């Protein structure tokens, strides 16, 4: 990736993250001022064709529809990383993959421990809530506060986060799917196969691709599997190797085209729909569920990421990437605690019909994500101000990657 293209990506990280924060703030304020009923009434407005069973509330359109756009970019980026990026080489990808697994397992166990000790009946189903990492927010904080740190740290965080999201998607598709209708699911998969053939055409059939994507999404929604899974699978079909006459693989081309719509439209609108937790007049939101979500994100993530990385680099031949040391992973561990988007989605899926548990979980997610962002940002500045050794990853070879975030 050229320096100019990387600069554009970092600028998008910053702008998208700030817009996400603004949308969430507006929703949170609106949901807690006089007239807050208008916020909830807006989200409960039903639109869409009833004949196709798509007469959904605006809140459902945000979580099921808009997030599919975001997950398409995640799928395309994952495909690129597996085929031509950091996940292609097991020696380079091993540590962030292991860190992602540890960063999901420890928060889940911590969540279960807290709700178990708190005696919260039925709350254990939300074990995956603090396991998610919000790529957009985490990269935005790194772009703003990580100036002067190695570019390799962004690649490490990106790799960890996309693996985290892949595991989160698998959890959503399996644990939080109540029913599966086989024929719509098979229809969705068939349309995704057709999309995969069309996306390889030498000409760019954009209208056809858009129609196929919408049909695949609608069939996936009808099957009972969360519709965002369709976005991931569609992204996986995009070729990750440049074809004849192409300077970039289509995974990067399509992600580059769709990311602005994801970062500046889909994610902010979802944040607006999901972050409006009413706490005024609703009684205390402090309870086992909110404490468990908060603790899992703020403490569980950093313990899981750092603990797993320490074990892997001590007990196996795997090492951290060039120019990255264990000290750099302390702020990264806290950045992975910014759950937000996917965590809010899982909170909604965990407690269908239980508005109190949903509100408490969302309150814990918002508080934990904010605390993780603040601590992570402060530690990034601390890390950037301290001198670096010539062999940060302690592999016996002087670091060669001298490019920094700036």
Image: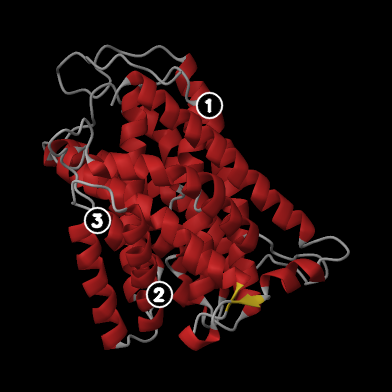
Say whether residue 71 is left or right of residue 202.
right
Residue toward you, 133 or 332? 133
Helix, strand or loop for disc 1? helix
- On screen, residue 388 above or below 174: above
Q: Residue at x 23, y 24 (%)?
A: 322
Dot 2 or dot 3: first in sequence order is 2
Dot 2 or dot 1: first in sequence order is 1
Say whether residue 209 is left or right of residue 288.
left
Q: CA distance from mark 2 to mark 3?
A: 18 Å
Residue position marked by numbered label 3 in the rendering: 236
Q: Position of residue 376 (x, y in %)?
A: 51, 36
> Callout 3: 10 Å neighbours few (<14), some, many (20+)?
many
Q: Nearer the viewer, mark 1 or mark 3?
A: 3
Q: Residue at x 37, y 26 (%)?
A: 6
Tell whether label 3 touches label 1 (CB within 8 Å): no
Tell whether label 1 touches label 2 (CB within 8 Å): no
Task: Answer with the quarter of the image where residue 153 lies.
Answer: top left
Q: CA distance from mark 2 to mark 1?
A: 40 Å
Helix, strand or loop for disc 2? helix
Query: Where is the N terminus found, in terms of image quarters?
Result: top left
The reply to whether residue 114 is visible in this rendering is: no
Residue position marked by numbered label 1 in the rendering: 145
Q: CA distance from mark 1 to mark 3?
A: 32 Å
Say whether residue 91 is left or right of residue 114.
left
- On screen, residue 353 above or below 99: below
Residue position marked by numbered label 2 in the rendering: 218
């Amino acid at each position: 990736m050229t320096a100019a293209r990387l600069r554009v990506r970092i600028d998008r990280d910053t702008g998208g993250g700030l817009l996400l924060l603004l949308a969430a703030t507006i929703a949170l304020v609106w949901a807690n001022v006089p007239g807050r009923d208008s916020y909830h009434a807006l989200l409960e407005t039903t639109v869409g064709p009833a004949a196709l069973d798509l007469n959904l509330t605006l809140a459902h359109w945000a979580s099921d529809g808009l997030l599919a756009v975001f997950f398409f970019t995640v799928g395309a980026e994952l495909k690129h990383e597996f085929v031509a990026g950091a996940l292609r080489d097991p020696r380079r990808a091993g540590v962030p993959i292991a860190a992602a697994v540890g960063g999901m397992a420890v928060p889940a166990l911590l969540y279960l421990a807290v709700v178990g000790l708190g005696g919260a009946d039925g709350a254990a189903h939300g074990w995956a809530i603090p396991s998610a990492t919000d790529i957009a927010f985490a990269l935005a904080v790194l772009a703003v506060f990580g100036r002067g740190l190695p570019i390799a740290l962004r690649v490490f965080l990106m790799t960890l986060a996309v693996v985290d999201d892949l595991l989160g998607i698998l959890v959503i598709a399996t644990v939080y799917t109540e029913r599966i209708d086989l024929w719509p699911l098979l229809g969705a998969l068939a349309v995704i196969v057709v999309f995969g053939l069309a996306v390889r055409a030498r000409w760019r059939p954009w209208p056809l691709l858009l129609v196929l994507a919408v049909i695949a999404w609608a069939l996936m929604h009808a099957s009972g599997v969360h519709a965002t899974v369709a976005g991931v699978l569609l992204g996986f079909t995009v070729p990750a190797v440049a074809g004849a006459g192409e300077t970039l693989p289509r995974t990067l081309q399509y992600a580059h085209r769709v990311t602005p719509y994801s970062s500046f439209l889909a994610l902010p609108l979802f944040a607006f729909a999901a972050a409006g937790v009413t706490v005024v007049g609703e009684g205390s939101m402090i309870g086992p569920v909110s404490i468990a979500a908060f603790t899992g994100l703020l403490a569980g993530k950093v313990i899981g990421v750092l603990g797993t990385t320490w074990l892997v680099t001590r007990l196996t031949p795997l090492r951290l990437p060039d120019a990255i040391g264990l000290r750099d992973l302390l702020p990264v561990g806290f950045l992975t605690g910014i759950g937000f988007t996917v965590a809010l989605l899982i909170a909604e899926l965990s407690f269908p019909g239980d508005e109190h548990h949903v509100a408490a979980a969302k309150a814990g997610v918002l508080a934990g994500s904010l605390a993780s962002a603040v601590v992570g940002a402060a530690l990034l500045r601390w890390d950037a101000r301290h001198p670096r050794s010539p062999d940060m990853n302690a592999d016996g070879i002087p670091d060669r990657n001298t490019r920094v975030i700036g």
